[in-house]
Image: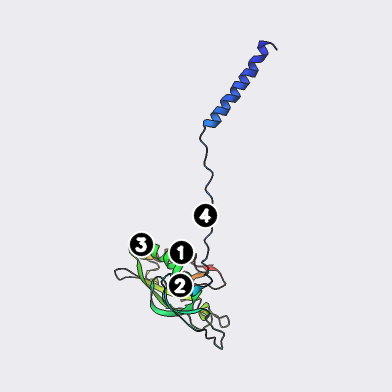
Amino acid sequence: MSPSRRLPIRALLAAGLLALATAACAPRQAPPPAAAPPPVVDRPPADCFEALARIGAEFEKQATRPTREGCRVDEAVMLARATIALNRPTLMTCPLAHALAAFEQDVVQPAARRHFGRAVVEIVHYGSYVCRPQTGRNTRLSEHAFGRALDIGGFEIEGKLVVSVRRDWADRGAKGAFLRDVAQGACRHFNIVLTPKTDLAHANHFHVDIGPYKKCDA
């Protein structure tokens, strides 16, 4: 082969080696970050009573007392405190108490520290178990009838600072922001969350429940 035919081949080899060297030295792009997994609604452990006791909840086991209307509370507890004290003890099912404890730790206390720099010392509620139909219905029983729902009216922060759903939901300051954060976070721990956004019947409280239906009005 003549010298005039070798030059293009050598040039091609040199160009190929240069391209390989350049590619090896070029910075590698990091792979795109993986999408965050969807939040998981808390599932109570096999022994819910033992789990509540482990986290230091204050409660008493209660007997199941079915009513003629079909109301009943299985795995019943009279709860005075999950991780935050309640303004008064209330009857509910143990899985609801377990979900409430996770909600308090994961949502309520971080929101309080973020907005006020202090912790919540008491949750003001309007009750859990009550044998009645759903609001506006005459047939289907409410989740309250099974102790699977709780109505939260407000929170007391350290230093006797009270945050009220009725008074502060529309507040443009820290109180309103705290309540809206809490309502949004509640949707990660409960199947239904109803707020003043829902209707006038919920103008003064958050309804949270672990029933079979899904709705987030935060």
Instruction: Name the residue that disc number 3 marks.
Output: 113
Could you classify mark 2 by the number of other residues whose Cα lies within 10 Å: few (under 14), some (14-19), or many (20 or more)?
A: many
Please tell me whether mark 2 or mark 3 is closer to you in this view. Answer: 2
The kind of residue on which mark 2 rests is Leu
What is the spatial separation of the Cα atoms under label 4 and label 2, in whole angstroms? 29 Å
Q: In this view of the protein, can residue 193 be seen by the observer?
A: yes
Q: Secondary structure at mark 3?
A: helix
Instruction: Name the residue that disc number 2 marks.
Output: 52
Which of disc 3 and disc 2 is earlier in sequence?
Answer: 2
The kind of residue on which mark 3 rests is Arg
Label number found at residue 36: 4
Instruction: Name the residue that disc number 1 marks.
Output: 185
The kind of residue on which mark 1 rests is Gly
Residue 137 found in image quarter: bottom right
Q: Residue at x 54, y 87 (%)?
A: 67
Check the image and report above or below for 29 versus 178. above
What is the x, y in percent for residue 176? Answer: 38, 65
What is the spatial separation of the Cα atoms under label 3 and label 4, in whole angstroms? 24 Å
Which of disc 3 and disc 1 is earlier in sequence?
Answer: 3
